[in-house]
Image (cartoon, rainbow, N blue to C red):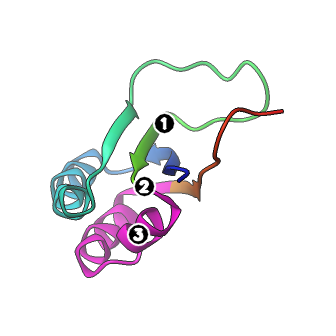
Amino acid sequence: MAKGYWIMRVDVSDPEVYKAYVAADAEAFRKFGERFLVRGGACEAVEGSSRARNVVIELKDYATALACYRSPEYAVAMKLCQRAATADIVVEGCEGSPP
């Protein structure tokens, strides 16, 4: 079964509120068994546009990735994120090797 992923590109406008978001999102991520593959760090957009911060989270499968995003636990965190940042979030997965 294919993994599910959150691929997030983020520009933080209020670092203090964003810290509260990161603390609040931990409850949802623990519940749904996240694995952070990328969390911040240096980045360079060698093509196209980018945001200042990138995060990639792996979950068990696509359904779990969506359930985490739509959970009551993440809803609390999402309100903080919406106050503190502009983000693009993509939830997707694939199975096997690309052709």
* SS of the residue under disc 3: helix
For the residue marked with disc 3, what is the amino acid? Tyr
- What numbered label is drawn on residue 54? 1
Whether pointer 2 and pointer 3 mark residues with C-beta atoms closer than 8 Å, the reply is no
Front residue (pair 36, 59): 59
Does the residue at mark 3 contact the one at mark 1 (Cβ under 8 Å)? no
User: Relative to 27, is 35 on the left or the right?
Assistant: right
Q: State which tag comes first along the sequence, 2 or 3.
A: 3
Spatial CA span between label 2 and label 1: 12 Å
Residue 69 tag number: 3
| Residues in magenta, as a range | 61-86
Q: Residue at x 30, y 49 (%)?
A: 34
Amino acid on which disc 2 is placed: Ala
99 over 90 or under it: above or below: above
Name the residue type under label 1. Answer: Asn
Which residue is the site of mark 2?
85
Q: Position of residue 32 (x, y in %)?
A: 27, 61
